[in-house]
Structure formats: C-alpha cells, structure tokens
Image (spheres, grey):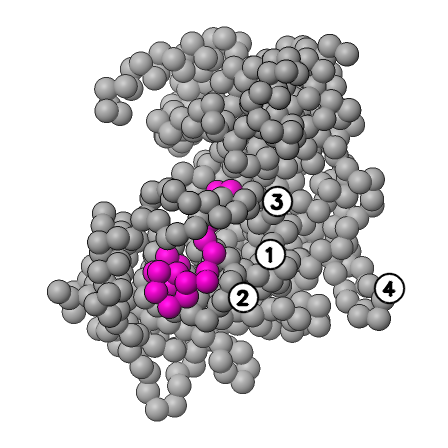
Amino acid sequence: MTVTRAEYCVVACAEVWRGAGEVLASPMGTVPALGARLAKRTFSPELLLTDGEALLVGDAPEAGNGAPVTEGWLPYRRHLALVATGRRHVMMGASQIDRYGNQNISCVGDWARPSRQLLGVRGAPVNTLNHPTSYWVPRHSPRTFVERVDMVCGVGYDRAAAAGPSATRFHDVREVVSDLGVFDFDTPDRTMRVRSLHPGVRLADVREATGFALRVPDGGVPVTRAPDAAELRLIREVLDPGGLRDREVPPCGP
Amino acid sequence: MDKVMTADDVVARLASGMTVGIGGWGSRRKPMALVRALLRSPLTDLTVVSCGGPDVGLLAAAGKIRRLVVPFVTLDSIPLEPHFRAARERGAFALTELDEAMFMWGLTAAGQRLPFLPVRAGPGSDVLRVNPHIRTVTSPYADGEELAAVPALRLDAALVHLNRADARGNGQYLGPDPYFDDLFCEAADAAYVSCERIVDGAELNRAGGPQTLLVSRMFVSGVVEAPRGAHFTSCAPDYGRDEAFQRAYVRAAADPDAWAGFVKRFLSGDEDDYQAAVAAFTEETAGERS
C-alpha cells in the first residue's frame, strides 16, 4: 500500500528523537505526537512521554487514548522546572518561522495592536534557551516561513548569539519538519537548509512556499526515508487506526 | 476561624484597580463562580494575572481589565480564546506578556518576598522587547552568567477553585495537577478559595493523602462553597470540561448579537440562575450530543 504524506511526516518527526536517550519527548500536534510514540516503540525506547497533562505514561498509547501505566508525575510546574534541567526535547508548532529558526506563536502584526492575536509566547523563550527544540509545520507556506517573524517567541540562532553566552549555552534548535520536507541549521551561518524532501515534492515547490532563500546541500537533496513495514503497521494499526494524521496532513496526489 | 462567605462577599472585599491573580490553567479548574461574581460587580480597571482561559475572556468581554499579565490564553480543546483575541485586536487593554517559566518564578518570588528570581528565559526573545521594565542580572559568581531578573508578581488578591476545603481555608485538590493555585495564594495579600464542597478536616483526610492539601489556611482569607463553580472549565475528578457549552460560548463570541443573547441567558442573573440555565442548556443539547 502506498505510504501517505502524513506517514512520511510521522517518520520524519520520530527521527527527531533518535538517540535522544532518557529525556522527555514533548510533541505539540497530532503528527509529532505520533512520531514521538513511534520513536519510543521502535528505535528510542528510553524516551519518556506524558499523557498531555500531568502524568508520565509508561508505554506508548494509541492516539487519543489514555495509558494504563503511569511511570511518573509531571504536573505543569514540574514540567516547567524540568525544562531548565535540559532533559527534554520539544517539538513545537510555529505560526511563523524565519531562516535562523526564530519562531512566533504569539501574534501576527504589530505586537502593540496585532492584526491577529494567537496563543501568546507560552514557554517558547524558556524552551529554546534550555534544551533541544524542533518545529512542526503542517502546512508549509510563505505566510509561515517568513523573512522576519513578528514576535520572537522561540529564539533562533542569530538572536541567541546576539543575546550572549547565557543564551547560547544550551541553545539547540535542531530540525523543522513540514508537510514538504525536513530542514535543519547545519550551515556555517546557521541559516535553514533543506535536509530532505518528502517523495513527490520538488525543490521548486519548497522554494515557492518559503519566504526566504533556503540553503541546499551540495550534491543534491535526499528524499525523506519511508517507514519500514513494521513502522507502517504500528502507525496504521496501533498508534492511529482512526487516521487522525490525515486530518493534519491530507493525502495528496503523486 | 470560620472563613465561609459567599462569592459576592469576596467581590465586596476587592476594589477597582486591584491586581488579581486567578488560579487554574487555560480551561481547567478556573474559579468561574468567583469570576461570574466579578462580572456582576461594578469593579473595573483590574490587573489580571492568569494562565489564561475563559476567565480572561469573560473579564475582557465585560471591559473589566486594564492590564493583563499572562504567558498565554487558551481554551485547550479550542486553542484560541475568542474574547481575548478580539480584545487584543481592538487594543482593549495593556498586556504584560511573559514566558511561562518567567510567570512561574515571578509568582514564586512574590510568595517568597523576593524582588526577583533569575531565570534562563527571555534573553534573545521579544519578551524583553515588549517588557522593557524587565532587567537582566549578572551572576556574582565566577560563571558571570547574565539571566533575566524576573520581577515578583505580587497580587492584591488571589482567586482559586479547589475540589474540597474546610471552613478554615485548608484547600484540597483531588485531580492530577495543582497548577499554580498555592503559589497564587502565597503571592497575594488576600486569597479566596472557592470549592466544590466545604467539608470537615476528617473528610479532607479521607478524600486523599496529605499532599492533596495544597493550600494552607494561613494564606486564605475566605472560603466559598460553589458546586460546579469551575463550570464550564474542568474540575477533575468531580467533572470534566463542558465541551458542548464551551463550543456554544465560542460560537456566541463570534457575533455581537449572539453574545448579547448568551449574556442575557447565562450571565444576567446570580450563580443559581447560571447553573439553572446551564442545566436547561444541557437538557436541550442532550439529543445533539448522543
């Protein structure tokens, strides 16, 4: 059976937590949540996961369902304190993100009188200064991948460097996964680079959907890896039999 | 030491212009009966400190807020709070937008009577740009680190909702998360606890272990018995969020006429009227939910 775009995205999100060790995986969004559970069930069994509220769950539950085993207590205040210990890798959303990985979830337009108020900064400033951070963007567009974000919530590489050694000490923005591909900051000037494209996506498509010039690796862009048979079975039969992933990333033509 | 009072008694002890902290988180265990009492009062020009949910939305819609101090405002199952959004987009109040950790340590500093606490959050982000009053502090030790000096979030009053309390003001939470309710109470000159039921000490002990006794009476000025007092937010394990009602709230907020109708139906009377109107709403919508 054909692997869907959403399933490529789940695997790309899971890869973010490969080799992370015994840290809390904090996914925001359906596809990242499936990715974290897939990683825990396969190549990163040491990961810790929450139930989305105050409990650490001992095994990877199906999407939308609770788990029978609780392995710890992580209410909001302890979750925030955990951030400063560094033992966490968060995958946040981004209403806007720029070439240095600065992220905005607060508001669009002038902060003093926004044209569109969003959530607020939440914990993005503390997350990005204390432990690895990745981002998930279900709909890659020039409105999201912008030249400059309107309100820096998650701190990117240029802003961390300008803020000094206490800001860069644990700063580590890893990857951006979108419905078109995977992006990282492994460039000399720490600007966003194409790491891989999902099958069926052309470089021109991504460039058109991005509001700044993306770096492209010499020697061509790889294709995002496909889930193997065991991973595909886990996604389809165990983690997301209801197909919630397709609501976040609708199936697309070849 | 009997501190039992009504929600209106609590509001009578507050004044316009005060800084009021509101416990709970998003659309979870908000002291909504106390918020509804605030809505019925003439109080205005409030500085509201909250991990914001519909408490912020309702107070913003009623024009009660002069300044809002929040790291976010959300309804959880519905990400964006419609009244908060609309109020921000029309510039209805001043905003102090803080990172979540800055918010937590600011409340903690207030309870600990410290002027500030150092936090590795803020530098590099626009939180420092939009809050020019927040300074940084350099470590006096060999590391020389420069961190945000998050100022204490001292409150005139705190409003929280818990599952149980005794008449003296010992408050108990029975759900999985204390949120910041005890921090709010300790950061305030006067704290008011509403609860699902006022019980005696022996019943508090039967209901849960000693660690569920979250708020100590030494920080509490008043206790209000308010069954379903967190509605429509969740109050686990007593009840979950009323999702159907929350959806109706959001639908009504999208249109001025619909909102006027919502206010007339649910918010024009006292707390008993509110709970009766909610019961009627639940009855009406039972068909569409099943």
Residue at (29, 74) in percent of width and height: A225
Residue pointed to by mark 3: A77
Tag 3, which chain? Answer: A
Label 1, label 3: how far apart the Cα atoms are: 10 Å
- On the same chain, marks 4 and 3? The answer is no
Label 2, label 1: how far apart the Cα atoms are: 10 Å
Tag 1, which chain? Answer: A
Tag 2, which chain? Answer: A
Which SS class for mark 2?
A: loop
Label 4, label 1: how far apart the Cα atoms are: 24 Å
Q: Is residue A221 visible?
A: yes
Residue nearest the observer in this picture, A207 or B248: B248
Residue at (37, 71) in percent of width and height: A182
Determine the residue located farthest toward the right in the rendered image. B140
**Residue A205, above or below B78:** below
Residue pointed to by mark 4: B140
Mark earlier in primary sequence (2, 1): 1
Which SS class for mark 4?
A: loop
* Quadrant holding the N terminus of chain A: bottom left
Q: Give the range drawn in magenta.
A: A36-54
Mark earlier in primary sequence (1, 3): 3
Residue nearest the observer in this picture, B21 or B81: B21
Residue pointed to by mark 2: A132
Label 3, label 2: how far apart the Cα atoms are: 20 Å
Mark earlier in primary sequence (3, 2): 3
Label 4, label 2: how far apart the Cα atoms are: 28 Å
Looking at the rendered structure, the kind of residue marked 4 is Pro
Quadrant of the rendered image containing residue B166: top right
- On the same chain, marks 2 and 1? The answer is yes
